[in-house]
Image (tube, rainbow, N blue to C red):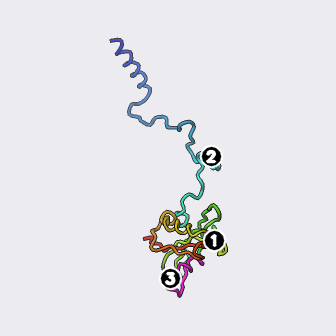
Amino acid sequence: MKKIILPALAVLTLSACEDPLNREGVGFTGIDGEPRTISEVKGAAAFLPDATNVPAELAELPTVQVTSDKVEADKLAGVAIDNAGRTSANAVQLSGADTDMYLSTVSVNGTLYGVLRTVNNSTRVDNSVGEIFGSETERFTGCLPAGNVYGKGSSSRSSGFAIPLNCS
């Protein structure tokens, strides 16, 4: 009988310290000192860079509106590439291994294009970048691709890529 009463008395005594219906607890502070907040120090465990959501950044930028007398899809894409943003003020800057690229949206004759381009026409990147841009269009722009990727340049290197978008 003493074996049952002594543990029961200990449990009742300890539970009397707190309201049994109050389940708030003392809070979780993390394992091994994990931070509970975001750090502003680059390289820290809880560092979160300012620009982490490319589609959200792209949505904040205005779409460039252009009209053209051209009607072929590849020519319209070329117009979109020529008029796309080239600075961080009018495009989302994407840092690459070799060169920085700029992502923006351009509406040519009412057709919306997602455009990925270099800072100028003399800087060229491999056309495999355009293939990747085409396959990852939704991830970069938040819109579905509505056609093929068009490049501006040679058969191996281009200064920009455009793809029609379906954002509805």
The residue where tag 2 is placed is: 44
Residue 152 is situated, as x and y percent measured from the top left of the image, at: 58, 76
Which amino acid is tagged 2? Ala
The label shown at residue 142 is none
Secondary element at image label 1? loop
In the picture, the disc for residue 124 is: 1
Q: Determine the residue positioned at 64% across, 50% down.
A: 42
For the image shown, how many numbered marks are present on the structure?
3
Q: Residues within 10 Å of mark 1 (few under 14, many from 20)?
A: some
Q: Where are the magenta residues, as a range?
A: 65-83
Q: Tell me which label, 2 or 3, sits earlier in the chain.
A: 2
Which structural element holds mark 2? loop
Cα gap from disc 1 to disc 3, whole angstroms: 27 Å
> Which callout, 1 or 3, points to the residue nearer the camera?
1
Q: Amino acid at mark 1?
A: Arg
**Label 3, on which residue?**
109
- Closer to the observer: label 2 or label 1? 1
- Tell me which numbered mark, 1 or 3, is placed earlier along the sequence: 3
Does the magenta-highlighted stretch encompass residue 48?
A: no
Crowding at dot 3, Cα within 10 Å, few <14 / some 14-19 / many 20+, comes out as some
Q: Residue at x 49, y 34 (%)?
A: 26
Q: Residue at x 40, y 22 (%)?
A: 11
Cα separation, mark 2 vs mark 1, equals 35 Å
Q: CA distance from mark 2 to mark 3?
A: 47 Å
